[in-house]
């Protein structure tokens, strides 16, 4: 049973139903039912034409539900006013589905949930497990999201930037439960790239591939974080890096720079260094300067201070950090690192401890506590 | 998307505005309060923001390890313990502001005289799973 194939067919099956005149919410439910049935039936009786099978079953499920609904409406003495399907404009349906699921009227969490279900073909239970909420809560989040976009015309032009933000959120959530959200985000971004020719889509795909390539090296066997400089570069996935770099270079050649391409360029420079010591920090600082011109996100300036510290020495890094808002998460962590590099271990230990108290995730907190403890025990000896 | 814990205290929180202990309410006021809490949880489930909620008995036991081969030592409850948790609710919301808004609504649960208790609730963010992209340099 090829679950990947099944899920990759989800968007095209769903859009066929919508094109036949089914409303989005009902069509989406019908496709979910068909997927569940496929998982049940296919192992013993695999269809020759998987997509045709799914369309037939989903359409039947849709009709069954529509008949049940209209019978109920007749009982309630209401008029059945199904609009006839209009003329089909020349748009890419899969792309429209991405736009709809990332519609700006949706909150980030509902756009993420709807995208994973309607475009990704994941079940509500899988999405709930990935985000550690009860299945009933996730089911409500999804049906609410569908209600929110129920008035949106399927053909309405969308903004690819909103889709990219949603996919980035999915990627960044990392890993919990059976579903590897990072891998799923890559799959969905790759699929999007096949439907729209846009350098920022390529930039995001490259960024994801370059980060994903380092995943095995990013955590120690005990689950603790391994900083970039200490990672075993032999464990980086070279095929993934090569693919990411290739996609990025093609995107950059088009001279329409955007945030994701700039971030991917930084990731590519790290990936390119055979050892941490050979990292081209001067170029990385230049990319951070580009990034700062493209976005007013203050985190960029925080990360830039780290890069300046590596390129021009810790004092220069601290000077760059002085201009960054001190209330940012990880500001203390960056300050601690730069002071440590500068040899001021007492200040560094204090700042690491402060950074640990302010950390917003567990692995980072443990990592920072460990660095503070290491410095403290060194000074006591 | 972030998870928050809403903590309700028997003791240890600053005094509520409508600070009449529950055993001095009328039975109707108590059922109105219970209903409000139930409706609140139902509403959060419908908005897709509810994760979990539990109430705790006020009296607990302190337990600690007492060495190899020995049973754990138990002690308490201690009447003087300053901070006593009464229960919690876990929510999964899009922003800190939304978490504050919901905590405010929960604090408006009716108490004596059918008026909002204005009870202080403690709002604590969960430590999130580590994000994929923020590669830590040595500093974090």
Image (cartoon, grey):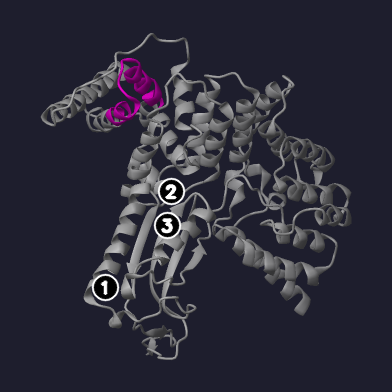
What's the mark number on residue A139? none
What's the mark number on residue B91? 3
* Alpha carbons under labels 3 and 1: distance apart: 24 Å
| Circle nearer the viewer, 3 or 1 | 1
Number of residues whose C-alpha sits closer than 10 Å to that of mark 1, classed few (under 14), some (14–19) or many (20 or more): some
Q: Are marks 3 and 1 on the same chain?
A: yes
Number of residues whose C-alpha sits closer than 10 Å to that of mark 3, classed few (under 14), some (14–19) or many (20 or more): many
| Circle nearer the viewer, 2 or 3 | 3
Element type where label 1 sits in the image: helix
Residue tagged by mark 2? A131
Q: Which residues are magenta?
A: A8-31
Seen as rendered, the residue at the extreme left is: A75
| Circle nearer the viewer, 2 or 1 | 1
Q: What x and y, as percent, mark residue B98?
A: 49, 53
First of labels 3, 1 by sequence position: 1
**In terms of image quadrants, where is residue A12?**
top left
Q: Is A45 on the left-hand or right-hand side of B18?
A: left
In this rendered view, identify the residue nearer to me: A240 or B47: B47
* Residue found at x 80% / y 59%: A338
């Amino acid at each position: 049973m090829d679950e990947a194939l099944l899920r990759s067919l989800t968007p095209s099956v769903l859009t066929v139903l919508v094109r036949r005149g089914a409303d989005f919410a009902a069509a989406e439910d019908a496709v979910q039912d068909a997927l569940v049935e496929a998982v049940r039936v296919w192992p013993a009786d695999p269809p020759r034409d998987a997509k045709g099978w799914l369309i037939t079953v989903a359409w039947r499920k849709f009709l069954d539900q529509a008949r049940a609904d209209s019978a109920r409406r007749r009982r309630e003495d209401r008029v059945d006013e199904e609009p006839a399907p209009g003329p089909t404009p020349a748009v890419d349906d899969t792309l429209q589905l991405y736009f709809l699921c990332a519609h700006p009227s949706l909150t980030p969490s509902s756009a993420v949930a709807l995208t994973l279900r309607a475009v990704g073909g994941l079940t509500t239970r899988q999405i709930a497990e990935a985000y550690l909420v009860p299945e009933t809560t996730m089911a409500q989040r999804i049906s609410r999201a569908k209600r929110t976009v129920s008035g949106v015309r399927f053909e309405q032009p969308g903004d690819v930037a909103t889709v990219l933000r949603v996919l980035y959120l999915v990627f960044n959530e990392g890993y919990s439960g059976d579903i590897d959200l990072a891998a799923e985000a890559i799959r969905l971004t790759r699929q999007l790239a096949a439907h729209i020719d846009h350098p920022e889509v390529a930039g995001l795909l490259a960024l994801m591939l370059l980060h994903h390539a380092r995943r095995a090296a990013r955590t120690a066997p005990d689950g603790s974080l391994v900083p970039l400089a200490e990672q075993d570069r032999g464990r980086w996935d070279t095929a993934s890096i090569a693919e990411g770099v290739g996609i990025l270079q093609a995107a950059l050649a088009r001279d329409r720079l955007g945030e994701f391409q700039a971030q991917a360029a930084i990731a590519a420079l790290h990936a390119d260094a055979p050892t941490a010591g050979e990292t081209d920090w001067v170029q990385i600082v230049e990319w951070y300067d580009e990034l700062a011109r493209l976005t007013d996100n203050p985190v960029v300036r925080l990360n830039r201070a780290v890069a300046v510290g590596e390129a021009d020495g810790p004092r220069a890094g601290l000077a760059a950090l002085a201009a960054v808002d001190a209330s940012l998460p990880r500001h203390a962590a960056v300050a601690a690192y730069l002071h440590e590099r500068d040899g001021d271990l007492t200040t560094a230990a204090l700042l690491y401890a402060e950074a640990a108290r302010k950390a917003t995730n567990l692995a980072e907190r443990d990592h920072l506590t460990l660095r503070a403890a290491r410095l403290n025990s060194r000074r006591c000896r | 998307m972030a998870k928050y814990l809403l903590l309700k205290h028997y003791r240890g929180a600053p005094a509520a505005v409508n600070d009449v202990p529950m055993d001095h309410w009328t039975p109707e006021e108590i059922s109105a309060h219970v209903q409000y809490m139930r409706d609140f949880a139902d509403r959060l489930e419908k908005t897709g923001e509810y994760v979990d909620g539990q109430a705790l008995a006020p009296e607990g036991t302190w337990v600690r390890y007492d060495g190899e081969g020995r049973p754990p030592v138990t002690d308490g409850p201690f009447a003087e313990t300053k901070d006593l948790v009464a229960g919690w609710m876990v929510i999964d919301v899009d922003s800190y502001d939304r978490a504050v808004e919901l905590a405010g609504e929960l604090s408006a649960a009716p108490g004596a005289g059918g008026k909002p208790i204005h009870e202080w609730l403690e709002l604590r963010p969960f430590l999130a799973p580590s994000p994929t992209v923020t590669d830590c340099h040595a500093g974090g």
